[in-house]
Image (cartoon, rainbow, N blue to C red):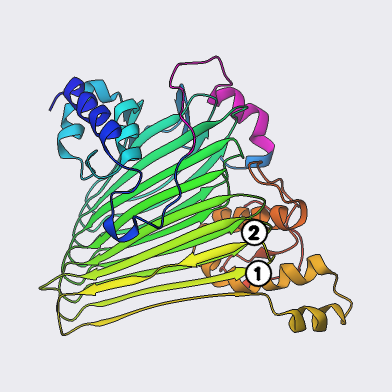
Amino acid sequence: MDHDAFVKEALANYSALPEETNLLYKRHHIPVPHLFSFNGTKEQGVEEYLKEHANALGIAFDLAVGSESHLLSSGRNIRVTSPSDDTQAIGTMMHKSSEDKYLALIDAHSRRFIHIEVPKGTSAELKILFVNGDSPLTSHVLINIGEAASLKLLELYTSSSARRSMSGVAHEINAAPGSKAEIDMLHNENANTTVMAFIRNRAGADSKIDINVFYNGGELTRARGTVDATGARSEVRVNEIVFGCSSQRFDINTMILNSGRESNASLESRAVLMDSSFCLLKGYAKVNRGASGSKSYVHERGILLDRGARIDGLPDMSVEESAVKATHSSATSPIDPEAVFYLMSKSIDELGVRRLIVSGFLAESVARMHNQFARDTSMALLDRKLEKKEFGLIPKAGEASWSFGEEGKKDMFLGHYKYR
C-alpha cells in the first residue's frame, strides 16, 4: 500500500469508527471531547525547548521530537523517515487503522516513522524526548531487536502547548529470539494535552520484554496496548503507574496474551488519585490455545486520597488452554483515616502522611525501572503533584523529598534528589 492509500483508508476509518471498538468495554470508556487542528503553527521548536530546559532535564537525548520538527543528535541505532517515503514500514506494521478511531487519526496525520534497530548480538541504550506543541504530535516508533540483542529505551513526554492539543504515539516492538528489552515511558504532558498511546509487540522464543509506563500528565489519557508473549518461553511484563489530580482522566486498556508454550505474561497496574480525577483500569488477559505451561496474571490496585476521586478496575481473563496458571484481581480503597490520624500524632503533617502512603504504595513499581533517571524523575513528579497539584513541568534537581539509590532500593527522606 502506498502512502496516499494508507492515509485515505485511515481517514475513512476515523470517520466510521465509534469511540470504543472493543465490545467488552462499550460502556466503559472516556469519550474524547475535542477536535484537533493539524494545521502547522509557529511554535517553539525542539532545539529551543532543549536550550530552555537543559538544566532541568540534566541528560542528553539521542532524539528530540516536536510537533513540527525533530532533532537527531545520535544516529546510532535510530533513523527517522517520512511516512510518505516509507512504504516498506507501512506494509509491515502490526497496528491497523481499523482497530481504533484515534489510531486511525495518528495514521492519517503521522509526521514521522522513528526506526530503532538493534542488530543481532549487540546492545543499545537510547533516550528520546517527545514535546508536543500547539499542533498535535503524531509519530510511530518501530522497534526491531535482533537475536540475542538487548535494548534499554527511555522516553520522556512533555509539552509546550498553550492551547488544546494532542500527543499521539504508536509503538511496535519486534523482539527476536533470545533478545531483551526494557522500555520506560514517562508521560508528563501539560493540562492542554490529550494523550494517545498505543503499543503492540511480537516476542520471539526465549525473549524478554519489560514495559514500564508512568501516566502523570495530560488532561485526558487514552492508552491501548496489546502485549503478546508470542514465542515459546517468552516473557512480557507490563508495569503501569497512574497518578492523577484535579480533573485528570485516564482510560487505560491493556491486553496481555500468552501465545507461546511456557510463556509468561503479566500486567501490574497501580493508580493513586486525588481531587476529582478519574481512572479506568481495563486489564485483560488471554491464554491462547497451544500455550500450555504458561503463566498469566492481571493485578490492579488503587488508592483514593480524596473523596471526589474514583477508580474503576475492570480485570478480565479468557483461558483456552487447561495446563496453565492464570489469575486476575482488582482492589481499590480510600486511605485509612485511622492510619492518617496515627501518623499525624507522630508529628508528621498531612503532606508528609500522603508522601509516606504514596511512596510505600508505588515504590515497588517505580523500582522496576532500572534506569536511574526514570526512577528519580518519577519520584520528583510524584512529589511535585503531591505538594503543588502540578504536572506538565520538568522537575529540577533537589525538588523531590525522597529518591532511589543506585541499586533501586527505597531511600525515603534521605539526602537530596539528584539527576545522575
User: Are the two marked residues, 1 and 2, in contact with CB atoms closer than 8 angstroms?
Assistant: yes
Quote the CA–CA distance across marks 1 and 2: 8 Å
Q: Is residue 51 magenta?
A: yes
- What residue is at 21 percent from the left and 82 percent from the top? 324
Give the residue displayed 73% in from the left and 67% down from the top.
355
What x and y, as percent, mark residue 268? 43, 69
Q: Which residues are magenta?
A: 33-55
Tag 2 secondary structure: helix
Q: Quadrant of the N terminus?
A: top left
In which quarter of the view is residue 141 placed? top left
Q: According to the image, label 2 marks what residue?
A: 379
Specify whether residue 77 is in view.
no
Residue 82, position in %: x, y? 30, 23
Q: Which residue is mark 1?
A: 359
Look at 66% across and 68% down and name the residue there. Answer: 358
Give the number of the disc on residue 210.
none
